[in-house]
Image: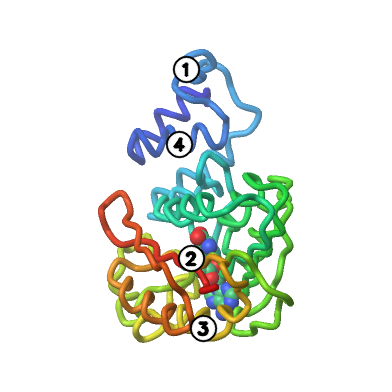
Amino acid sequence: MTYSELYAYAKSRLTDYEAMCIMEDVFGFDRVGLAVHGNEIPASESEFLTAVEKRAKGIPLQYATGKAYFMGREYFVGEGVLIPRDDTEVAVNECMKLMAGHERVIDLCSGSGIIAVTLAKEFPEAEIYAVELESKAFVYLEKNVKYHGANVNLVHDDIFNENCVEGEFDVIISNPPYICRNIIPNLQSEVRYEPETALDGGGDGLDFYRCIADKWLNKLKQGGKIILEIGEEQAESVSNLLKRQGITQISVVKDIQNLDRVVFGTMKK
Ligand SMILES: C[S@@+](CC[C@H](N)C(=O)[O-])C[C@H]1O[C@@H](n2cnc3c(N)ncnc32)[C@H](O)[C@@H]1O
């Protein structure tokens, strides 16, 4: 089939938007590229057709193409790793505003590595660590760090083991699992393709925030910053956990939908 025929086939199975995304991810063509090269025949069509079939079965678009985008960069994703969400930009933007550029930073529960890679690319002088437990996710973390040539120290470990990285930090940032366990079965069907280990925050959704407060905040330097992505109803509980461990100047930041999305603060001096 020609590129135009493949595109027409994809549109017969999926939405126009999805067909175009797969066109771009597999062949690198946008609409203009397609208009120019439409009558040509690709060297291979199997990757394109496989992605169309996967998406037609309800597999998330990013898993179908194996690619996702975050703050202007491309990341490899697939089964076993959370698909990056635009919401996470809120935490990364706050973190970048708080950083000068040479800090020692740890990204806990790193997943595909979007947070650690963005910070490493924006602040090449920073010393950045990324901790991820799940082996399938860790493979994507390693791959994305390598692909971007990012200066990130990779740690394949459990954040409940606070000794997995030695020393103190200027910045702790995390988008941990934060969904209440009993809500997970009711989530949108596409989310259920994603690993439960990336979503499950325990009975009240706060297990990882308690872990970070209890085990990691004593490794935050005086004047150091903590930035946490949160679920929309968790601002008060998470702020209280931080306050109890000496965090001051706590602020809550909303996302584009006006929902609480990030809590950040400073370790008292
Ligand atoms: C909500 S996802 C966030 C991934 C990534 N930071 C992002 O923003 O897209 C949480 C991640 O925590 C990892 N994780 C779960 N339990 C963990 C643990 N005990 N220690 C380290 N990582 C863990 C999951 O595998 C998943 O990759």
In front here: 109 or 46?
109
Q: Point out residue 193 in the picture as x, y percentages from the top left corner.
A: 43, 64
Answer yes or no: do the residues labelled 4 and 2 have beta carbons within 8 Å?
A: no
Question: Residue type at mark 3?
Answer: Cys
Callout 2 secondary element = loop
Mark 3 surroundings: few (<14), some (14-19) or many (≥20) residues within 10 A: some
Work out whether mark 3 precedes mark 1 in sequence or the reverse, and give the earlier one: 1
Answer yes or no: do the residues labelled 1 and 2 have beta carbons within 8 Å?
A: no
The quadrant of the picture occupied by the C terminus is bottom right
Q: Which mark is residue 32?
A: 1
Q: CA distance from mark 1 to mark 4?
A: 13 Å
What residue is pinned by disc 4? Answer: 21
Question: Residue type at mark 1?
Answer: Val
Callout 1 secondary element = helix
Here the colouring is: rainbow
Question: Residue type at mark 4?
Answer: Cys
Question: Is ligand 1 closer than 8 angstroms to the Cβ of mark 3?
Answer: yes
What residue is pinned by disc 3? Answer: 211
Using the rendered view, name the quadrant where residue 222 is placed: bottom right
Q: Point out residue 37 in the picture as x, y percentages from the top left corner.
A: 54, 16
Q: Is residue 4 above or below residue 166?
A: above
Callout 4 secondary element = helix
Residue 195 in sight here: no
In front here: 255 or 195?
255
What residue is pinned by disc 2? Answer: 175
